[in-house]
């Protein structure tokens, strides 16, 4: 296949997942400007790394993982700023449920965050995830269970703010 | 399964599903991201390099190739070139550059009392300059050297200097001493007129400041290879993404995998082989180009080899066998200087730590092959940076000793300190060969 066609095809694929990428970025970075910047940077990075992608059926998952890695880097670099924001809100006991969950999910390690995003944010089924990760569904269920348990603990430590029954 | 938490997570995810961003804008953003690839490739700017300040190192590890007799014969006959032949004997690329007429003769001399400084000539490409200079004095001096070198553009614009290095002092009493200074840029430089500033110093207190302007405009185009071949580092697949051969040095761009488990700190023997399996370009002087595995933003770093730009070859193979690597997130030591205790050492390589002053300590290590300055940024236990100005390497009877002196005193409450490691004495053997053409 010609180089140009290869490039065009690649761009079309990224375009097809543009909303998934944007939403993921927005969930981490919380501003349209930062999320758009992330989409641009991730397109660039994904294009450079495109030969690392062995099976095209996983392109979306692969792109989302690059995006999550990028956002985690950005947040790490801005750690001081983000922390300040949370501390102020904390004092006023005015966390929205969304912000509280954001914070709890960001307390998970990088691989757990990715799993939560793929499962709940992007709606992958256990069967799909089990193919992608190459592990049994049962293993994935228990990994998700561990993530949810960690989230539960983090959320309850945050001061007993509970939603629903 | 904790349904309550799960429901909250599902609701949280739902809350992000509606976006207000314009679809058109999003499409354009992706196109722009793709165009960035072309733009950045054109500029070949490596982000990490602009991030590092000028790194100054002396040529202390001169190893490698001997001068070919034919080369010495040809070039050594040219008046004034005898010293230069001696200087390039470890670098075939430089020899080839000289043989192919890429040495630009300058011959500009500035006198300051009893001392003359001459810029003999320059080899340059878009990423760097090697400046050959000769100091002449009336009296013989030991430790004669050109030091505190600065290179500026004559038009007053800042040059994107990535590394700057200058030669070793003379080891005997001399009245004439030729050395070279090298400057490498983090992005291509168009300027052709430069000013070199520096101090000629020697034992006995000689110190004279010099400023010499010169012109160097010869800039052959680089040869570019798109590679995209992977190699193993522990459990990780790292990738060589491109190789760019410039006249002065060859740049090898390495791509770090996502979620890497191993931090690749250094290639021990990365080299380019020709069709006869002869190493043409290899890592120069034990300095791998100062990039380190996580110092970049786009997931790549660069390693620099001697250049094989002027060599003709039928086949080119990139080969490597041995690398320094440690598990990711583990590239640091934690030291309690108060109790002289190593609190964290990723693979337990260091035997002990000993404090020798309020601001300095020594690390002891078995074996005899780790001759690096491994120390990166230092932090106290609250995350405040502690700067450090020097380190050295020595041996006692049984052990290797790495001495590190910090700029501030370390008080008891600052312990344990965290010392990021740029190098670490752990090696992985993974013989790999990648054909480039």
Image (tube, rainbow, N blue to C red):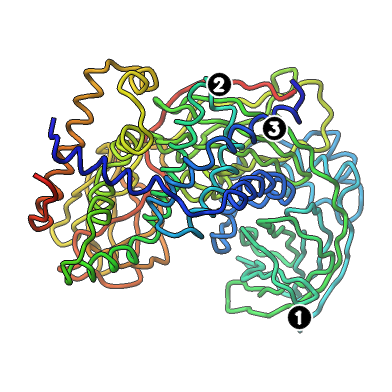
Q: Is residue B236 left or right of residue A54?
A: left
Kindly report the distance in space between the C-alpha atoms of the residues bearing marks 2 and 1: 55 Å
Kindly report the distance in space between the C-alpha atoms of the residues bearing marks 3 and 2: 29 Å
Q: Position of residue B84 (x, y in %)?
A: 79, 51
Mark 2 Cα within 10 Å, few/some/many (few <14, many 20+)?
some
Q: Choose the circle earlier in sequence order: 2 or 1.
A: 1
Number of marks in the image? 3
Q: Which residue is mark 3?
A: A7
Q: In this view of the protein, which residue sits in the foreground, B31 or B360?
A: B31
Secondary structure under tag 2 reads strand
Q: Is residue B289 left or right of residue B150?
A: left
Q: Which residue is mark 1?
A: B114
Secondary structure under tag 3 reads helix
The chain to which mark 3 is attached is A
Q: In this view of the protein, which residue sits in the foreground, B131 or B114?
A: B131
Q: Which callout, 2 or 1, points to the residue nearer the camera? A: 2
Is residue B372 visible in the rendered image? The answer is no
Q: Which residue is mark 2?
A: B432
* Picture layout, residue B324 above or below residue A130: below
Mark 1 Cα within 10 Å, few/some/many (few <14, many 20+)?
few
Q: Looking at the image, which residue is at 60% across and 20% down? A: B433
* Picture layout, residue B88 above or below residue B274: below
Q: Which callout, 3 or 2, points to the residue nearer the camera? A: 3
Q: Position of residue A86 (x, y in %)?
A: 25, 64
Quarter in which the N terminus of chain A is drawn: top right
Q: In this view of the protein, which residue sits in the foreground, A12 or B407?
A: A12
* Picture layout, residue B281 above or below residue B404: above
Q: Is residue B48 left or right of residue A158?
A: right
- Quadrant position of residue B318: top right
The chain to which mark 2 is attached is B
Q: Residue furthest top?
A: A136
Q: Is residue A72 left or right of residue B27?
A: left
């Amino acid at each position: 296949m010609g180089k140009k066609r290869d490039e065009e095809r690649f761009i079309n694929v990224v375009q097809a997942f543009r909303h998934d990428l944007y939403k993921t970025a927005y969930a981490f970075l919380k501003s349209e400007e930062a999320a758009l910047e992330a989409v641009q940077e991730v397109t660039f990075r994904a294009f450079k790394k495109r030969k690392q992608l062995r099976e095209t059926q996983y392109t979306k998952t692969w792109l989302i993982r690059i995006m999550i890695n990028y956002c985690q880097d950005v947040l790490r670099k801005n750690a001081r700023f983000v922390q300040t924001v949370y501390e102020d809100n904390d004092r006023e006991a005015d966390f929205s449920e969304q912000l509280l969950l954001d914070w709890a999910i960001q307390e998970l390690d990088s691989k757990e965050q990715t799993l939560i995003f793929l499962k709940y944010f992007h709606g992958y089924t256990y069967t799909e995830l089990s193919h992608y990760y190459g592990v049994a569904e049962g293993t994935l269920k228990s990994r998700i269970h561990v993530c949810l348990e960690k989230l539960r603990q983090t959320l309850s430590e945050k001061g007993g703010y509970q939603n629903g029954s | 399964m904790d349904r309550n938490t799960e429901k909250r997570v599902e609701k949280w995810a739902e809350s992000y599903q509606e976006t207000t961003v314009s679809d058109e804008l999003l499409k354009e953003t992706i196109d722009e991201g793709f165009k960035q690839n072309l733009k950045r490739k054109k500029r070949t700017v490596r982000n990490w390099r602009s991030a590092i300040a000028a790194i100054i190192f002396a040529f202390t590890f001169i190893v490698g190739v001997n001068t070919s007799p034919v080369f010495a014969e040809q070039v050594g006959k040219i008046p004034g070139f005898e010293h230069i032949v001696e200087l390039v004997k470890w670098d075939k690329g430089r020899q080839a550059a000289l043989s192919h007429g890429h040495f630009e003769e300058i011959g500009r001399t500035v006198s300051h009392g009893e001392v003359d400084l001459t810029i003999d000539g320059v080899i340059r490409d878009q990423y760097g300059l090697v400046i050959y200079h000769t100091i002449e004095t009336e009296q013989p001096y030991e430790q004669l050297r050109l030091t505190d070198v600065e290179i500026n553009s004559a038009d007053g614009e800042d040059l994107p200097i990535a590394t700057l290095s200058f030669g070793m002092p003379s080891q005997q009493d001399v009245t004439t001493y030729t050395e070279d200074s090298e400057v490498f840029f983090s992005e291509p430089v168009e300027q052709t007129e430069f000013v070199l500033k520096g101090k000629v110093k020697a034992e006995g207190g000689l110190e004279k400041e010099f400023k010499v302007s010169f012109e160097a405009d010869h800039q052959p185009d680089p040869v570019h290879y798109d590679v995209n071949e992977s190699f193993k580092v522990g459990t990780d697949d790292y990738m060589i993404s491109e190789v760019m051969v410039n006249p002065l040095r060859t740049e090898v761009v390495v791509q770090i995998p996502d979620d890497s488990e191993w931090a690749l700190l250094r290639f021990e023997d990365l080299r380019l082989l020709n069709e006869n399996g002869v190493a043409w370009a290899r890592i120069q002087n034990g300095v791998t180009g100062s990039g380190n595995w996580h110092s970049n933003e786009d997931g790549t770093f660069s390693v620099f080899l001697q250049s094989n730009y002027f060599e003709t070859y039928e086949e080119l193979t990139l080969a490597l066998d041995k690398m320094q690597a440690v598990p990711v997130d583990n590239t640091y030591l934690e030291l309690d200087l108060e109790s002289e205790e190593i609190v964290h050492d990723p693979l337990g390589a260091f035997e002990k730590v000993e404090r020798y002053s309020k601001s300095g300590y020594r690390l002891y290590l078995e074996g005899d092959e780790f001759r690096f300055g491994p120390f990166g940024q230092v932090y106290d236990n609250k995350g405040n940076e502690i700067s450090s100005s020097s380190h050295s390497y020595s041996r006692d009877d049984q052990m290797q000793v790495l001495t590190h002196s910090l700029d501030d005193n370390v008080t008891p409450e600052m312990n344990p300190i965290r010392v990021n490691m740029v190098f670490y004495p752990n090696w992985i053997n993974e013989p790999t060969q990648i054909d480039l053409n």
